[in-house]
């Protein structure tokens, strides 16, 4: 791991094995020709789906989390007047997408109440469900704060009410436990906590219903010699052309995840706790989420006179990579940019101590 990398939530560091898998596949494509080097991704799909307790036939690869969410929601046949529950902590890209879909299709966005920690309130969801919802969209963890949403509880409430539940796992898969939630669909990305390569995102849809379809039909490859027939099942969402080497690399990254097992989640929660304890109060910076939150996404509110951009620049001078989260990342929640510190597994405590000194300067 490059020393000083504290931006796993932005773009994590792929392991050597992942890099080798990507480069190995690119070489194979050059040697054999891309279409002659098509990899069998069944095992990769099986391993990825297992992270949420689903099966290989539930997986569709796309190029990013944003593309996956757009394919899923953009293709969903919800009647005008349908009510979509979304919290104000939601990811900026999804807020934009839902606002556009609401404006064009007459969907109504219903605010899901959150508590003082910005955690979606299960009782609030229950009352919204009683009043009537047709779809619920929640980010398990946000890009802009480290609060882990009570996804299992929210999922159970939606299931009991017969309302589809879409869970954005872009920041949670590979960082916290995602099995046992029972969402209708999961939206994820490769390069964050799964530490896969860039250029791969995915949908996992255990509960495909007749109302769900891809916004554009796919031919499912270029090698068909019959009349075009739209692909069936979850594969309809998959872009047949894409960064195939990235999908291979993601497979290798997920295998590493399975080898590390749930101990990884405890390790990351511990790193988050250590980081918050060391950084809270340094130079007047304040941790935004509860100190003991079981995640390795740590966000810091600036003291007067030291904007996040300045602190990130000072960190860069000290060879530390941190992220400035702009308000657009969570436009209904963030009031000012925050500094995000997201240590990859194995980050030495000393790196976090160095950052505390940089903030205090
Ligand atoms: C990063 C992120 C996305 C979008 O994923 P991309 O691969 O960048 O398109 C969606 N939701 C959350 C919570 C994210 O952090």
Image (cartoon, rainbow, N blue to C red):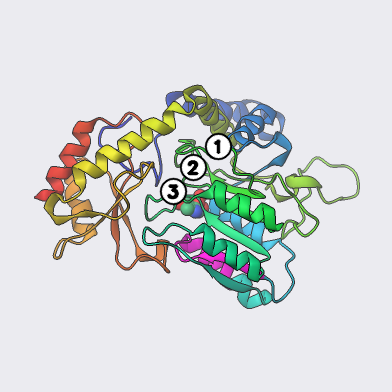
Quadrant (top left/top right/bottom left/bottom right) for the N terminus: top left
177 on left or right of 338:
right
What residue is at 60 percent from the left and 56 percent from the top? 69
Q: Closer to the camera: disc 3 or disc 2?
A: 3
Q: In the rendered structure, which disc, 3 or 1, sits on the residue that comes first in sequence?
A: 3
Query: How busy is the neighbourhood of tag 3: few (under 14 within 10 Å), some, or many (20 plus)?
Result: many
Query: Which quadrant holds residue 210?
Result: bottom right
Q: Is residue 217 magenta?
A: no
Q: Residue tagged by mark 1?
A: 246
What residue is at 21 percent from the left and 59 percent from the top? 302
Query: Which quadrant holds residue 14?
Result: top left
On residue 148, the disc is 3
Tell me: residue 331, above or below residue 204: below
Please tell me which residue lies in front, 11 or 163. Answer: 163
Q: Residue tagged by mark 2?
A: 198
Q: In the rendered structure, which disc, 3 or 2, sits on the residue that comes first in sequence?
A: 3
Query: Which quadrant holds residue 89?
Result: bottom left
Tell me: residue 123, above or below residue 104: above
327 on left or right of 252:
left
Q: Is mark 1 within 8 Å of ligand 1?
A: no
In percent of width and height, residue 80 lies at 72, 75
User: Circles 1 and 2: CB distance less than 8 Å?
Assistant: yes
Q: Is mark 2 within 8 Å of ligand 1?
A: no
Q: Which residues are magenta?
A: 83-99
Query: Separation of disc 3 and disc 1 at Cα?
Result: 28 Å
Tell me: residue 82, above or below residue 74: below
Query: Separation of disc 3 and disc 2 at Cα?
Result: 24 Å
In percent of width and height, residue 43 lies at 66, 27
In percent of width and height, residue 312 lies at 23, 52
Q: Is residue 87 magenta?
A: yes
Q: Secondary structure at mark 2?
A: loop
């Amino acid at each position: 791991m490059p020393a000083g990398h504290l931006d796993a939530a932005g773009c994590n560091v792929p392991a050597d094995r992942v890099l080798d898998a990507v480069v190995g596949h690119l070489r194979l494509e050059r040697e054999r020709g891309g279409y002659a080097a098509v990899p069998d991704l069944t095992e990769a799909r099986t391993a990825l789906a297992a992270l949420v307790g689903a099966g290989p036939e539930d997986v569709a690869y796309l190029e990013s989390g944003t593309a996956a969410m757009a394919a899923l929601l953009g293709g969903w046949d919800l009647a005008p007047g349908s009510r979509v529950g979304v919290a104000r902590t939601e990811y900026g890209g999804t807020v934009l997408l839902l606002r556009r879909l609401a404006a064009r299709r007459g969907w109504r966005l219903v605010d899901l109440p959150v508590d003082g920690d910005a955690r979606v309130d299960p009782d609030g969801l229950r009352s919204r469900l009683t009043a009537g919802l047709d779809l619920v969209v929640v980010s398990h963890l946000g890009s802009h704060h480290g609060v882990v949403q009570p996804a299992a509880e929210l999922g159970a409430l939606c299931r009991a009410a017969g309302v589809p539940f879409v869970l954005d796992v872009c920041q949670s898969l590979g960082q916290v436990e995602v099995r046992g939630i029972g969402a209708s669909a999961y939206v994820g990305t490769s390069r964050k906590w799964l530490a896969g390569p860039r250029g791969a995102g995915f949908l996992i849809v255990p509960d495909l219903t007749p109302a769900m379809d891809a916004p554009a039909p796919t031919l499912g490859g270029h090698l068909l010699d019959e009349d075009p027939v739209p692909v069936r099942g979850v594969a309809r969402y998959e872009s047949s052309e894409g960064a195939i080497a990235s999908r291979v690399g993601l497979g290798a990254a997920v295998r590493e995840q399975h080898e590390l097992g749930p101990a990884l989640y405890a390790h990351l929660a511990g790193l988050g706790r250590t980081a918050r304890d060391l950084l809270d109060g340094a130079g007047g910076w304040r941790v935004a989420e509860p100190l003991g939150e079981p995640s390795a996404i740590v966000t810091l509110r600036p003291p007067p006179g030291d904007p996040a951009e300045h602190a990130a620049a000072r960190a860069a001078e000290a060879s530390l990579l941190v992220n400035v989260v702009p308000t657009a990342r969570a436009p209904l929640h963030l009031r000012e940019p925050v500094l995000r510190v997201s240590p990859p597994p194995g980050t030495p405590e000393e790196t976090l101590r160095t950052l505390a000194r940089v903030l205090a300067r």
